[in-house]
Amino acid sequence: MGVTFSQFFSPRASLTEQNLPSQKGKVFIVTGGYSGVGYELVTVLFQAGGKSVVHDTSSAGQLEYLPLELDDLSPIKASAEAFKAKEPILDVLWNNAGVSLPPLGSVSKHGHELQMFLASELARKVGLQGILNVVQNPGNLKTNLLRHAPVWMRLAASPLLHNAKQGAYTELWAGLSPKLTMDTNGGYVIPWGKVHRSPRQDLLDALMREEEGGTGEAGKFREWCQQQTAEYV
Ligand SMILES: NC(=O)c1ccc[n+]([C@@H]2O[C@H](COP(=O)([O-])OP(=O)(O)OC[C@H]3O[C@@H](n4cnc5c(N)ncnc54)[C@H](OP(=O)(O)O)[C@@H]3O)[C@@H](O)[C@H]2O)c1
């Protein structure tokens, strides 16, 4: 509860455009990079010289647009291949695109619920290749995310919301902070850039496999997702 409350009133961000080192030569993907938090993050990366795939080039960084509809599995492989054909390396992928409170009954092109979550299992898998994966809550922010929420909810939430730029700082830290190492693989980053030290035990149990003393729910969900996506990868 304390941690939840503290996320509304977090201390100052430690990694911002003021102290971010040059990102020249680095390549990033930011999904949903043209709205809200993603837009602010791309702006910071661009100003620091990074190449973000999300048109236009200038004296600072570089921006490219990669068509990608994440609620349709069919074209995703082609998008990934198009990226690989252009870039030999990807430094950081921010899976930033997302929805909240979509209209009741909203599903993907394949009938899946739109707000699914797989971070811990991804960390297990890619961690073996030395790729660090964290999940993050960017904060409570003024963006287009609540476009489907009722007006009363938007009005009630408004005084508690921060500028979208603050959320970009959380994501910046999650992607580029030198404080994150493989020891924090699978960790949960909270505003405006720190690791949540005491996640709820029932959630930790669900993330752990049965042989580790957990309930194995996340693993079962990953297996189901693999079956659902097998023909598209
Ligand atoms: N704002 C908050 O308080 C808050 C709190 C917790 C977590 N978050 C998370 O932060 C992330 C960024 O959200 P935001 O607040 O910046 O909201 P936003 O302004 O609505 O931006 C979300 C972005 O995701 C894109 N997107 C959504 N569904 C997509 C799909 N199926 N395929 C491709 N792109 C898709 C949107 O594109 P279109 O505009 O074209 O749909 C938009 O560019 C989300 O994952 C959200 O869940 C936000």
Image (spheres, rainbow, N blue to C red):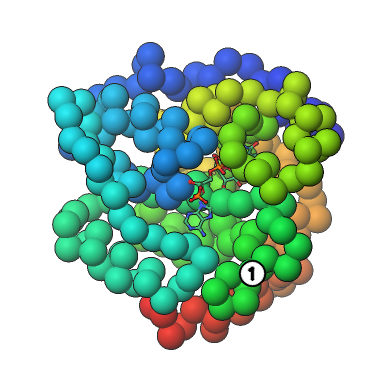
10 above or below 94?
Answer: above
Q: Is residue 109 left or right of residue 76?
A: right
In this orientation, does residue 50 appear? Answer: yes
The residue identified by callout 1 is 107
Find residue 155 and report its image quarter: top right
Q: Quadrant of the N terminus?
A: top right
In this orientation, does residue 194 appear? Answer: no
Viewer-proximal residue among 152 and 34: 152
Q: Tag 1's secondary structure?
A: loop
Instruction: Pinpoint residue 233: horizontal percent, then vertical percent.
Output: 39, 77
Q: Which residue is drawn at 39% across and 53% down?
A: 131
81 above or below 56?
Answer: below
Instruction: Pinpoint residue 34: horizontal percent, then vertical percent.
Output: 42, 41
Instruction: Pinpoint residue 147: horizontal percent, then vertical percent.
Output: 65, 44
Kindly identify the amino acid type of the residue bearing the numbered disc 1.
Answer: Val
Q: Residue at x 67, y 66 (%)?
A: 106
Q: Answer few, some or many: residues within 10 Å of disc 1's Cα (few below 14, many 20 plus, some between 14 and 19).
A: some
